[in-house]
Image: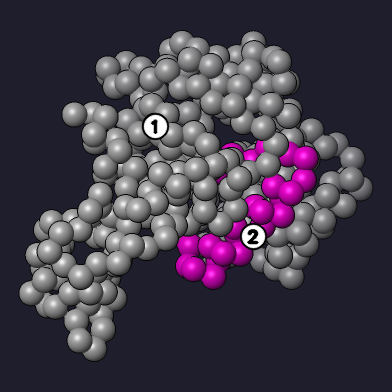
Amino acid sequence: MNISIQGLHKKYSNGNQALKDVNLEIKEGMFGLLGPNGAGKSSLIRILVSLMKPSSGQVIVNGKDAAKNRAYVRGMLGYLPQDFSFFSNLKTYEFLDYAARLAGMSSRKKRNEAVDRLLEDVGLFDVRSRKASKLSGGMKRRLGIAQALINEPQIIIVDEPTTGLDPEERIRFRNLLARLGSKDVSIILSTHIVADISSICEHMALLNKGEIAFSGSPEELIRQAQGHVWSIYATEKEYLEINQKYEVVATVMMNDGWKITVVADEVIGYKAEPVHPNLEHAYVYFVEHTLKKVQR
C-alpha cells in the first residue's frame, strides 16, 4: 500500500489558502498527522477521502490517481470523521449491520459474522443490544472505528479520534489503533494531541498553516530538541519571571518551590538542568523556536 500526495493546494472561495504545496509519502503502518487547530489537517483528510477536490495537485493510491478512480479508492477506505453520527434509534449491532449493507455486504450470514467479529474486536459485544445513542463517548468512538472496518479496508483514516475522551478511553482507543496498525494496512491518524502520535505512530508529519513543516519519525523530531529542554528549580518569585521569559511545558509544585520544564536554546540566571526531550517537548520547541526562526 502506498499513498503519494503530490503538490497539493487547496484554496477556498473565500480566499483562505488551506493547503500549500503539500507533499507526503504514506506507506503501511501508523502515520500521524499532527498540527494545531486550523493547520489544514481536516482539509487534507477531506481530500484524501474524496469528499473534496484540491485546487491543484494530486493524490496517488497504489499508482492510481484518486480523483480519477474514486470508486477504487473508496472501496479500500475506512473513515472515522471527527464528528461521527448515527441513527439514534438503532441498537449498536443494528447500526453496524446498516453500515455493512451500505458497504455492499448483501449476504445476511456474512453481515452477522462481520458484525459479531467487529463488536468483539472493539469491546462492544456485551452492549450490542444497547441503543447506540446510550453508549458512552469512548464506546461511540469504538463503534465508529468498527463501522470504518466493516469492509476490511486497506486504508483507515481517523480524524481527531480521542478528542473529548477520558484518559482511560483514550489509552484504550490508542491500543485498538495500534493493533490495527500491526496488520497490512495504512492508518492515518489526524490529531492535535501529541500523545496520540508519540504512543503509536512510526512516521509522522507536522502541518502548520497549510504547509508540511516536518516529515519523518517521532524520534527524528525529538532529536532536534535535544539540548533545548530544561528543568528549572525555582522559588515562587522566580516562577512568575520564568513564565514570562520562557516557553513553559510543565510545572510541579515542590516543598521548597517549583520544578519547571521549559524549552529554550539556553537558560540564564536560574538553576537549570538539561532534560531528555519527549515528543511533546519537541513539538513545542519546533513550533515556538524552529518555525518562528524560519518565518522571521
> x%, y% of residue 175?
64, 60
Judged from this view, the residue extending furthest toward the bottom is 255
Between the C-alphas of marks 1 and 2, the distance is: 28 Å
Labelled pair 1, 2 in contact (Cβ < 8 Å)? no
Please give the residue where the numbered disc 2 appears in the rendered image. Answer: 175
Determine the image quadrant of residue 76: top right
| Residue at (75, 65) in percent of width and height | 125
Secondary structure character of the magenta stretch overall: helix
Tell me the quadrant of the picture where the C terminus can be found: top left
- Could you tell which of marks 1 and 2 lies nearer the N-terminus? 2
| Label 1 neighbour load within 10 Å: few <14, some 14-19, many 20+ | some
Determine the image quadrant of residue 183: top right
Badge 2 marks a residue whose secondary structure is helix
Please give the residue where the numbered disc 1 appears in the rendered image. Answer: 213
Q: Which portion, as a residue range, is magenta?
A: 165-189
- The disc labelled 1 sits on which kind of residue? Ala
Badge nearest the viewer, 1 or 2: 1
Q: Is residue 236 left or right of residue 103?
A: left
- The disc labelled 2 sits on which kind of residue? Asn
| Residue at (39, 23) in percent of width and height | 19
Is 131 situated above or below 85?
A: below
Q: Is residue 124 left or right of residue 5?
A: right
> x%, y% of residue 238?
11, 71
Q: Is residue 279 left or right of residue 61?
A: left
Is 112 situated above or below 50?
A: below
Is 120 situated above or below 47?
A: below
